Amino acid sequence: MRLFLPAYSFLFSEIGMATSLPSQLPVLITFLFLLLLSPSCFAGILRTCQFDAIYQLGDSISDTGNLIREDPLSPFARPPYSETFFGNATGRCSNGLLMIDYLALSSGIRFLEPYLNTDALFTRGRGVNFAVAGSTALPVEILAENKVLAPVTNTSLSRQLDWMFTYFNGICHDDEDCFKKLKTALFMVGEIGGNDYNYALFQGKSFGEVRSMTPMVIQAIKDAVTRVVGYGATRVVVPGNFPVGCLPIYLTGFQSNDSNAYDKYHCLKGLNNLAIHHNNLLKQAIEELRKELNVIIVYGDYYNAYLKLLSRVKLLGFDTKSTQKACCGIGGDYNFKLDTMCGAPGVQVCPNPDQYISWDGVNLTQRAYKFMTGWLIRHIYSKLQCGA
């Protein structure tokens, strides 16, 4: 807090001229709380890390246009996706910017081009996005062996890593050159794994069956981190899963008449417990990797970033009546139908997406991602050891 108080110390002196400080403490505390929570407080802070590139692996939370190049008929390839910020569809599964976009802005790096954009000029000083919406941590063949189909894409985490290897082979002369070039890059390995569970649950697998998949999913992520470190990564962020029981897709698909099935935020406890289980195993894996690989590996706590946002919706100006409704959707308690999603004919977009957390029932709005990124940066910055 010491960083922020001097800039606003004039408030204390001016208030003191009119009234006593104790009577204004609630106002000041609220003001300072909102100031600290605001992502603008952390805008640009990653510049001090001097990252000259960011490399992203993941799914729809991070995809900036790979899926729509695999599948031009994807709804993400047309409005209303991306319109709020870009004015046209870019393949981002939101109304505008994603968390990776805000991380790039904070690092002073231009938005990452999707790897499959053959028109993009990939240069050092920028990085590349390998994430594909709908991707799974496990190869689709492994999922199929467990009677789970991946309906959106065949590009799993291992294929994204193969793309990354191909890319680095093109920009590096040899391993030593790669280690030198990637030493000052940030690697984002995920979020990934959520779709493995999503597909299994919506294809009729029980919670127990899905929970039994978790060690395999975690191992796939662990292997991915080992591979990127082998390429030359020295700073890696590995995000965990969201509290999926708070998302309209799950609130609709697993709606319950039992009030005990919900927590204080009206999120489904069972689904959130599954995400917590995944995240706990992931944190254990990260601890193991730190010891094995001797590089900086940081857990990205997307789960608590989302809950922090959810607990502050009123203070942050979100519509408290629409906290768990999709902005772009139709029907039901959560403005969401699995068979009539955003982008389908007749599906309307809310007039005020900045007041919504959920964009399409699965992915979040630009403004929600903005606040989550601000919280995330605050919690990972010191662990990245940028001054080291």
Image (tube, grey):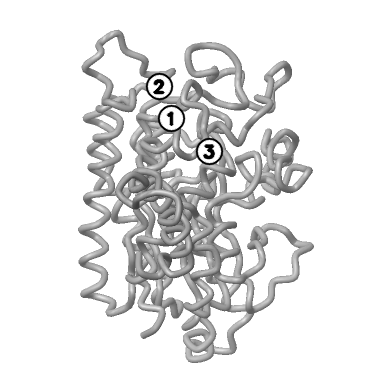
Answer with mark 3 or mark 2, whichever residue precedes in sequence: 2
Real-space CA distance between mark 1 and mark 2, rounded to the nearest whole angstrom: 6 Å
Which corner quadrant of the image does residue 274 belong to? Answer: top left
Crowding at mark 3 (Cα within 10 Å: few <14, some 14-19, many 20+): many
Looking at the image, residue 295 sits to the left or right of residue 280; the answer is: right
Circles 3 and 1, Cβ within 8 Å, touching? The answer is no
| Residue 275 higher or lower than 138, as above or below | above
The residue pinned by badge 1 equals 247
User: Whole-percent x and y of residue 21?
Assistant: 34, 52
| Residue 128 higher or lower than 344, as above or below | below
Amino acid bearing label 1: Leu
Answer with mark 3 or mark 1, whichever residue precedes in sequence: 1
Real-space CA distance between mark 3 and mark 1, rounded to the nearest whole angstrom: 9 Å
Q: Residue at x 65, y 24 (%)?
A: 350
**Quadrant of the rendering where the N terminus is positioned:** bottom left
Which corner quadrant of the image does residue 118 belong to? Answer: bottom right
Badge 2 marks a residue whose secondary structure is helix
The residue pinned by badge 3 equals 364
Which corner quadrant of the image does residue 43 belong to? Answer: bottom right
The residue pinned by badge 2 equals 251
Quick one: 82 or 35, which is closer to the camera? 35
User: Whole-percent x and y of residue 215?
Assistant: 24, 48
Circles 1 and 2, Cβ within 8 Å, touching? The answer is yes
Quick one: 188 or 258, which is closer to the camera? 258
Amino acid bearing label 2: Leu
Quick one: 16 or 312, which is closer to the camera? 16
